[in-house]
Image (cartoon, rainbow, N blue to C red):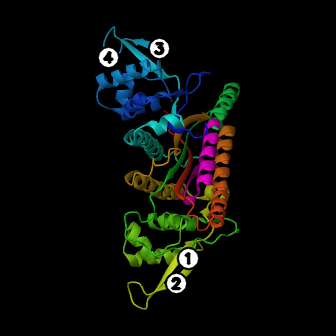
Amino acid sequence: MNGYSKLVENSGAVKNTDAPPFLISAKLAKALANPWRNRILIELHLRPMSPTQFADQFGGPGLKVISRYFRQLKEWGYLEVAEELRGGRRRGAVEKVYRAIQRVHFDTKTWEGLPRYLRDECSGAILESLLLRIAQAVEAETFDAEPDRHLSWRALPLDRQAWTQYVTRLDEVLESINELEAESAMRIAATGEAPIFATVALLAFRSPEPGANESPRPSRTPAKTTGAPAFLISAKMAKALANPWRNRILIELHARPMSPTQFADEFGGPELTTIARYFRQLKEWGYLEVAEELRGGRRRGAVEKVYRAVPRAHFDSATWEGLPQHLRNEYSGAVLDALVLRITEAVKAKTFDAESSRHLAWKAVSLDRRAWTEQVTRLDEVLAWVGELKAESAARTAATKGQDPEQIPATVALMAFRSPVA
């Protein structure tokens, strides 16, 4: 699946088939970009439903239109009739229950051949469904129910080679989820273990260039490379980092050094004095360090400190499991808010679909405990590997000094969390 741009990758109670993945045409892509057809496909990859059941649960443009969408998706080969129910609201009427029979994705050639507006529409439909999935899990308080749930995202510069390596790795992870789910289903059938209904999401997209819509900024010093171990934060620090602006400062400074003034000019937020205080606090707590001091600027003779991030902050399992549930929810909320903001900025700047190999996929799965642990471990390994990719990319860039090597300002995100029971 190297190089594929996913449209939807949902399974669940999907009929097992050895047929190859279905490559959709531009005409069908336009049809599937309709958010309600897309939502029907997503939900029916979780469980069979009738048009009436779907309309009752999710609303939409009306039962008549929803029923037509179901029939169209059946005609196009995405759904099949699982059973027919008689009676119901209309005595003697037959209500068809449909189920999904195949997953949908684009190969690179098809995706690159689509008009840009159509790629944006398809991505918008997938993002909408993913954000809804997250919102449902947060509302049902299942998002942080598993102590080893995975939620991470990073903004980092990658050269073309590193970018290709990363999206290829995501393709492999996505493919491995199918294997885990199949193995899990056999074990569940043998042991009767209660399954974990989970959602796994993988994203990689081009971010807007720093300050793309702003006036030119002073040049920034590359972040210092360090071999120090990742900094494990305490429950007290977790509460501090749950503040969305401290969290955003950390995220941005892991991409490049900045001063409080540069940050405030580019991202807004509370007053500059408050932003500057957040920078100082994060330095005191060991997350930032002063990279350089700039003299002059807006205030003649003043000294402006430029900060950079020190080793990435994260939780080890023992620390995370020891946090109270409300604190885990608070921290997750801050990280999710920042990620959604990052996605929104990329969509608005039209960079989200700028790379034809961008990766956007989410999958609803039913796993046993063993498969869940294996999946989270794989995401942890990918997260650790991202640091190596960044270092290798930086080394290649330095070696080609003066040749203006291409740099992709990338955002990468990985998620695995428990979903509400359908």
Give SS at disc 4.
Answer: loop
Q: Which mark is residue 83?
A: 3
For the residue carrying disc 3, how many other residues have a C-alpha within 10 Å: few (<14), some (14-19), or many (20+)?
Answer: some
Pointers 3 and 4 in contact (CB under 8 A)? Answer: no
Q: CA distance from mark 3 to mark 1?
A: 62 Å
Precedes in sequence: disc 1 or disc 2: 1
Circle 1 residue: 283
Name the residue type under label 1.
Answer: Lys
Q: CA distance from mark 4 to mark 1?
A: 64 Å
Q: Which residue is located at x 32 percent, y 32 percent?
A: 60
Give SS at disc 2.
Answer: strand
* Position of residue 279 in the picture relative to residue 188 (left or right): left
**Total residue callouts:** 4
Q: Residue 207: percent from the left, percent from the top?
A: 47, 56
Start-end of magenta stretch? 149-175
Q: Which mark is residue 89?
A: 4
For the residue carrying disc 2, how many other residues have a C-alpha within 10 Å: few (<14), some (14-19), or many (20+)?
Answer: few
Specify whether residue 304 is painted magenta.
Answer: no
Name the residue type under label 3.
Answer: Glu
Precedes in sequence: disc 4 or disc 2: 4
Precedes in sequence: disc 3 or disc 1: 3
Pointers 3 and 2 in contact (CB under 8 A)? Answer: no
Q: CA distance from mark 3 to mark 4?
A: 17 Å
Pointers 4 and 2 in contact (CB under 8 A)? Answer: no
